Image: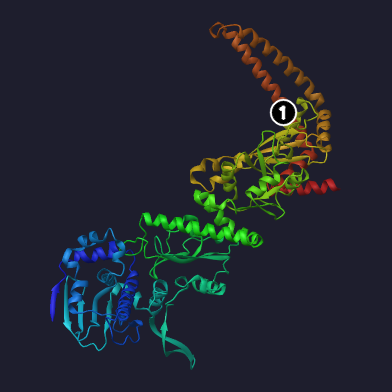
C-alpha cells in the first residue's frame, strides 16, 4: 500500500474547492458524471484511431445509491487510470499548489472543463471520504484504489477489478444526506446530465405490478445522447422541434416558431431558440434559455451571451468557445462573447425578416405575441433596430397592420399639422377611450392601438428616429387641437363669459387624491360632447415612463393634471351660461363694477409710479397700491363665491361633470352613488 500527502494543507485545498471554485454543492454530480463521460469518449476516440483494439461493449455511465452504506457511486467503462495517472491527475495539486494551479489556467478557462483532477475534487464538498477504484484500458494494467478522507493524506493500493474503467465512491457527509435520496439525485441528473452524449443510467425502470411499483431489468436511462440541437437542421421536421420544446418545457403552449443556430466559424455554436406564445405580460419569464458546454448543462443565467431582449426566449445554446470560470457556473466578459451575441442578434433578425417576407399574413397573426420581443430589442439594441425597422409593425384600432413606412404614407395627407409634423394618434384602450377614438375617426383620422407594455416607449423612440413625427394619445386634447391646422374654430362667447363659465365648473370639480383639474372653454361644434376631460400627453408619458425607469421616479410623485374642456357650441353649455347670467346678475353686477373701478385706480397708480425711481416712491403710495390690490382680491373672491353657489345648485353642471369623470374612470364611491340618484331624479 502506498501512502502519501497531497502536499498542501487542508486549509488550502478544500476551502478553495468549496468557496471559490464551486458556488453550489450540487454541482459535484455534474462534474463527476461529465468526467465519466469524458473518459468514455476518450476510449471511443482511441478505438476509432486504432489505439484500442479491444471490445468496447456497454459504455453506459452508471450512477447508484446505497443508502445503508451511505454511498453514491459513479461508474464508467472508459479509459480508466494507472497508479501513475492517479498520481498525475488526482494528486497534481501537490505539484504547484492551488493558487499556482488556478493561475496556470486563468487565461484558458476552457482547458479546465473536463479536467479530471479539479472536477474530481468537487466530490469533497459533500463527502467525508472518497474512493477511486480504477483500471486502465491498457493491456496488463493493474487495478488500484485511491482513498482520501478530506485530509491532506491519501492511500493507494492494488485491488482486484475485472473490468476497465473507474468507480468513484462518495461516502456522503452527515450534513449532506439529501444526496442519498433517489428523488434528489434524479432531479440533479435531469438538470445537468439530460443531454450528455453517453448513456447515463440511474437505477432500473419500474412498472406497476401486484399493486406496487417494482423494478424491471431495463436500465433507467435519464439522458438523450443526441439532442435536437446537435442534428443537422435539414434532417428535422416541424414536429421534431415541437416535440423537443415539449421535452424542455412540458407545461408550456406550443411555440410560435424557432431558430436553429449552427455555426462553426469563427466560433462554435449550436442551439435552438424558441419564441414562446405569450398571452399577457404577466407570463414573461427570463432564464428560460439554457447554456450547455459540449452537452453539459452550465447555467440558465445567460446574460452576456444572449442579447438582453432575447433572454425572454426559450431554448438551448451549446458552445465550447464560451469562456467560463473553473466551476463552469458563471460567464466571463470576453471578446468572443460579444461576437456570439452579435451573431445571435443577426440570426434572430434574419429569421424574423424571412418570416415577414415569406408570409406577411402569418407574421401579422403572430405580431401581438412577437412585438414584446421585437420592441424590447429595438429599445435596447441599436443594431437590432436597424434590422427590425423594416418588419416591425403598427396596428390600428381596426386590426390592420402597417410597417413604419407604410403608416407614414397612409396618414401623410390628413395628419400633418400646420408645422409640418406628422401626428400619429393612438389609444391604449379601445373601450375606455371609445368617444375620443370616434371623434378622431369622424375627422378622417387613423388611430393606432398601442396597448402593450413597451408600446409607448417605442413611440418615444420613433419620435427620435423618424423625421418630423409625433405620437399623441386621442384623449390628450380635444380633437380640434390634436392635429392643429390653420383656421381653427374660435369660441363665439366673450372673454368674461368664458372665465365665468370656467369658474362655475372649476369650483365643482371633486377633490381626488393626486389629481388636479383646470377648466377651459373651446368651440368644438354643436354635435361634439358638451364636456371632455383630457390629460397632457407629455405628463402622462413621463408618468408612464417612470414606471419603467427608476431614474424618473420624480414624475410618478406628481399629481395627475386634467383639463376640463367645455364646448361653447353645445346647447347644454349655452344653457348653463344663460342660467348663470340670470341667477348671478344681481350679485355680480355691483361686484364686477367695483372690480373695474378698482382696476382702473390701480392702473393709474402704477402709471404714476412708473415715472419715478423706486427710492422716490413713498410708503404712503406703496400702501395705497397694496390696499387696492387687497380690495380687488376680496371682490374677486366674492365673485368666485357667487359663481360657486350657482354651480353648487345647478344639477346640469354636476351631471355634466360626473359624466365626464365617469367616461375617464374617475367617478367612484359616494360620488358615483350621488350621480346615479341624480340621474334617476332627472329622468322622473
> Foreground: 218 or 150?
218
Which quadrant of the figure has residue 130? bottom left
Report the residue at 68% width, 22% height from top.
Answer: 634
Q: Describe the element under mark 1 as helix, strand or loop.
A: helix
Judged left or right of residue 676, residue 268 is left
In the rendered image, residue 225, in percent from the top left (x then y), is placed at 42, 77
> Foreground: 168 or 361?
361
Judged left or right of residue 236, residue 300 is left
In the rendered image, residue 606, in percent from the top left (x then y), is placed at 64, 11
Q: Say few, some or many: other residues with alpha carbon within 10 Å of mark 1 (under 14 / 14 to 19 / 20 or more).
A: some
> Foreground: 413 or 204?
413
Can residue 280 be seen from the camera position used here? no
Q: Is residue 488 above or below residue 354?
A: above
The quadrant in which the N terminus is found is bottom left
Q: Is residue 293 above or below residue 372?
A: below
Can residue 545 be seen from the camera position used here? yes
Which quadrant of the figure has residue 602? top right
Q: Is residue 242 above or below residue 511?
A: below
Report the residue at 19% width, 64% height from top.
Answer: 11
Outermost residue to the bottom = 210
In the rendered image, residue 455, in percent from the top left (x then y), is placed at 60, 50
Judged left or right of residue 208, residue 471 is right
User: Mark 1 — residue?
Assistant: 640
> Foreground: 358 or 184?
358
Which quadrant of the figure has residue 165? bottom left
Amino acid at each position: 500500500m502506498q501512502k502519501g500527502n497531497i502536499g498542501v494543507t487542508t486549509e488550502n485545498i478544500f476551502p478553495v474547492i468549496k468557496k471559490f471554485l464551486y458556488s453550489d454543492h450540487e454541482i459535484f454530480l455534474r462534474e463527476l458524471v461529465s468526467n465519466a463521460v469524458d473518459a468514455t469518449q476518450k476510449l471511443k476516440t482511441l478505438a476509432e484511431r486504432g489505439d484500442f483494439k479491444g471490445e468496447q461493449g456497454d459504455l453506459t455511465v452508471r450512477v447508484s445509491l446505497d443508502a445503508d452504506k451511505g454511498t453514491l457511486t459513479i461508474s464508467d467503462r472508459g479509459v480508466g487510470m494507472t497508479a501513475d495517472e492517479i498520481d498525475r491527475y488526482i494528486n497534481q495539486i501537490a505539484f504547484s499548489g492551488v493558487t499556482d494551479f488556478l493561475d496556470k489556467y486563468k487565461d484558458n478557462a476552457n482547458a479546465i472543463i473536463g479536467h479530471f483532477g479539479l472536477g474530481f475534487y468537487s466530490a469533497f464538498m459533500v463527502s467525508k471520504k472518497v474512493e477511486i477504484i480504477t483500471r486502465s484500458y491498457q493491456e496488463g494494467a493493474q487495478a488500484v484504489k485511491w482513498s482520501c478522507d478530506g485530509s491532506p493524506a491519501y492511500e493507494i493500493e492494488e485491488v482486484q477489478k475485472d473490468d476497465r474503467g473507474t468507480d468513484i465512491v462518495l461516502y456522503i457527509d452527515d450534513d449532506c444526506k439529501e444526496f442519498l435520496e433517489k428523488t434528489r439525485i434524479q432531479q440533479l441528473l435531469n438538470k445537468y446530465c439530460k443531454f450528455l452524449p453517453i448513456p447515463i443510467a440511474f437505477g432500473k425502470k419500474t412498472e406497476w405490478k401486484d399493486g406496487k411499483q417494482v423494478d424491471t431489468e431495463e436500465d433507467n436511462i435519464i439522458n438523450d445522447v443526441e439532442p435536437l440541437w446537435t442534428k443537422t437542421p435539414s434532417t428535422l421536421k416541424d414536429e421534431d422541434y415541437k416535440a423537443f420544446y415539449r421535452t424542455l418545457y412540458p407545461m408550456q403552449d406550443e411555440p410560435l416558431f424557432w431558430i436553429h443556430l449552427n455555426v462553426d466559424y469563427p466560433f462554435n455554436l449550436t442551439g435552438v431558440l424558441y419564441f414562446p406564445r405569450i398571452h399577457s405580460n404577466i407570463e414573461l419569464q427570463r432564464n428560460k434559455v439554457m447554456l450547455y458546454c459540449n452537452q453539459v448543462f452550465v447555467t440558465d443565467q445567460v446574460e452576456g451571451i444572449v442579447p438582453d431582449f432575447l433572454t425572454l426566449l426559450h431554448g438551448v445554446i451549446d458552445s465550447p468557445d464560451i469562456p467560463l470560470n473553473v466551476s463552469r457556473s458563471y460567464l466571463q466578459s470576453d471578446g468572443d462573447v460579444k461576437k456570439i451575441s452579435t451573431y445571435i442578434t443577426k440570426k434572430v433578425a434574419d429569421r424574423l425578416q424571412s418570416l415577414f417576407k415569406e408570409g406577411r399574413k402569418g407574421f401579422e397573426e403572430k405580431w401581438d405575441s412577437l412585438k414584446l420581443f421585437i420592441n424590447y430589442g429595438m429599445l435596447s439594441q441599436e443594431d437590432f433596430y436597424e434590422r427590425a425597422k423594416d418588419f416591425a409593425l403598427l396596428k390600428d384600432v381596426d386590426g390592420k397592420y402597417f410597417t413604419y413606412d407604410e403608416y407614414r404614407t397612409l396618414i401623410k395627407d390628413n395628419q400633418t399639422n400646420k408645422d409640418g409634423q406628422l401626428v400619429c394618434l393612438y389609444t391604449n384602450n379601445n373601450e375606455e377611450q371609445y368617444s375620443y377614438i370616434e371623434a378622431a375617426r369622424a375627422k378622417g383620422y387613423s388611430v393606432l392601438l398601442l396597448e402593450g407594455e413597451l408600446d409607448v416607449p417605442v413611440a418615444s423612440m420613433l419620435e427620435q428616429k423618424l423625421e418630423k413625427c409625433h405620437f399623441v394619445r386621442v384623449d390628450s386634447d380635444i380633437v380640434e387641437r390634436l392635429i392643429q391646422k390653420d383656421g381653427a374654430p374660435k369660441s363665439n362667447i366673450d372673454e368674461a363669459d368664458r372665465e365665468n363659465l370656467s369658474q362655475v365648473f372649476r369650483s365643482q370639480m371633486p377633490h381626488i387624491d393626486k389629481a388636479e383639474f383646470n377648466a377651459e372653454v373651446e368651440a368644438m361644434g354643436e354635435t361634439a360632447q358638451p364636456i371632455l376631460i383630457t390629460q397632457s400627453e407629455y405628463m402622462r408619458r413621463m408618468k408612464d415612463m417612470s414606471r419603467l425607469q427608476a431614474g424618473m421616479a420624480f414624475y410618478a410623485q406628481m399629481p395627475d393634471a386634467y383639463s376640463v374642456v367645455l364646448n361653447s357650441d353645445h346647447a347644454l353649455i349655452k344653457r348653463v351660461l344663460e342660467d348663470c347670467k340670470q341667477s348671478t346678475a344681481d350679485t355680480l353686477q355691483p361686484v364686477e363694477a367695483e372690480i373695474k373701478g378698482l382696476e382702473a385706480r390701480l392702473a393709474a397708480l402704477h402709471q404714476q409710479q412708473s415715472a419715478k425711481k423706486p427710492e422716490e416712491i413713498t410708503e404712503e403710495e406703496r400702501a395705497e397700491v397694496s390696499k387696492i390690490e387687497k380690495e380687488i382680491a376680496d371682490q374677486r373672491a366674492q365673485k368666485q363665491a357667487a359663481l360657486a353657489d350657482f354651480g353648487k345648485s345647478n344639477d346640469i353642471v354636476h351631471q355634466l361633470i360626473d359624466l365626464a369623470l365617469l367616461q375617464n374612470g374617475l367617478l367612484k364611491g359616494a360620488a358615483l352613488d350621488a350621480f346615479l340618484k341624480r340621474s334617476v331624479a332627472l329622468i322622473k
